[in-house]
Amino acid sequence: MSLDFPFRVRAFSSSLAFFLAFASAQAGPAYHLIKEIPVGGQGGWDYLSVDSAAARLYVSHATSVVVIDLRADKVVGEITNTPGVHGLAAAPELGRGFVSCGREDKVAIVDLKTLQTLSKVGTGKNPDGMLYEPLRREAYLFNGRGSSATVIDAVSGKVVATIPLAGKPEFAQADSRAGRVYVNIEDKNEVSVIDTQSHAVLQHWPIAPGEEPSGMAFDQKNHRLFLGCGNKLMAMLDSGIGRVVATVPIGDGVDANSFDPGTGLVFASCSDGTVTVAREDGPEKLTVVQTLKTERGARTMTIDPRTHRIYLASAKTEAPDPGERRPRIVSGSFKILVYGLDGGK
């Protein structure tokens, strides 16, 4: 008998369990709450991002980035001094992260091993969304009030281009094979297409019937972009021709989208306390398979494609202070909600 037989049995059992869970997802609702990861502290939050290979979750919170070990599901560190932080884009092969510091109009370049800031580099006004493009090893910072994108050489840490945009950029995705970066232009109801070699905007794609796109996810294999739109729609756009080919209804207050290449499922998280789970059923067909109930205000999300789990940030809130519009976040209540197809602990 092979010495690795017990391992093979465990691996087969694990694969079978996931297959059965995924088969259930094809038939109907399957995602459910697995656990909550307490974070605590004070202040609001924005983007979450996963480094699947390192099993780490990066969560923007107040003026820092909280680092969570996804093997132990606990906080293991913090990246500090990131005023107005929106999120972190990881460059795993370089051991670096790029944090958008909106209040400073800077990006913090961080050593992901030590969690120390190596340098800060000026961007346009209010850098918000961010991504890392691995082929050219460049980080893109999308400047919300600057209507531009700042491109940084991830190795040298130097700015290599500033790209004017037609309006307010939100989230973006990179297609390294095509040499393109796609970015939502929220106030123009369009997607701008950037050439990664020339750093020039090549095209502007209207997204009607969608409006005010914020979140974006990408299925590279099938050339499909998924846009979370403010008029309660998720639009599926052909990234080859720039045409909306399908839409499905979603909740109110969408902020993030994620795509799981392993299951073909796409997610839209909304502040009304729902996540719409849809499935690609063809080149021009998107089908809602579940409306997952989360918590009100849990609008930002990311996915770990290795485990197929989704992560959302949430906290308890109270009535706003006089003169304030937003509810007040209860101190110490910030947490991460973990949803999955399995019954993992």
Image (cartoon, rainbow, N blue to C red):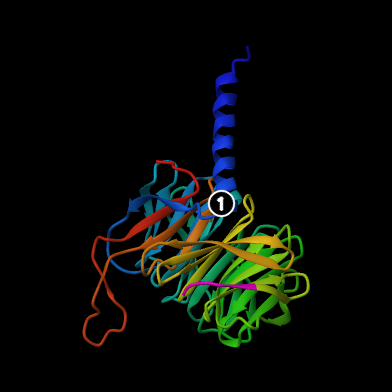
The reply to whether residue 221 is in sight is yes
The residue lying toward the viewer, choosing from 335 and 121, is 335
Q: Going 37% across and 61% down the picture, which residue do you hit?
A: 80
Q: Position of residue 338 (x, y in %)?
A: 42, 52
What is the number of callouts on the image?
1
Q: Is residue 265 left or right of residue 245?
A: left
Q: Going 63% across and 66% down the picture, which residue do you hit?
A: 173
Q: Position of residue 277 (x, y in %)?
A: 54, 61
Asked if residue 227 lies in the magenta stretch, the reply is: no
The span shown in magenta is 247-251
> How would you classify the magenta stretch by its main secondary structure?
strand
Q: Position of residue 86 (x, y in %)?
A: 45, 69
**Figure quadrant of the C terminus:** top left
Identify which amino acid the numbered label 1 is placed on: Ala
The reply to whether residue 119 is in sight is no
**Figure quadrant of the N terminus:** top right
Q: Going 59% across and 30% down the picture, which residue do you hit?
A: 12
Residue 24 vs 250, above or below: the answer is above
The residue lying toward the viewer, choosing from 288 and 50, is 288
Q: Is residue 328 left or right of residue 126?
A: left
Q: Residue furthest left?
A: 322
The residue lying toward the viewer, choosing from 17 and 324, is 17
Q: Is residue 247 left or right of residue 337?
A: right
Could you tell me which secondary element the residue under label 1 belongs to? helix
Q: Position of residue 223 (x, y in %)?
A: 73, 64
Q: Going 69% across and 60% down the picture, which residue do you hit?
A: 281
Q: Residue furthest front?
A: 27
The residue lying toward the viewer, choosing from 136 and 74, is 74
Residue holding disc 1: 25
Asked if residue 250 lies in the magenta stretch, the reply is: yes
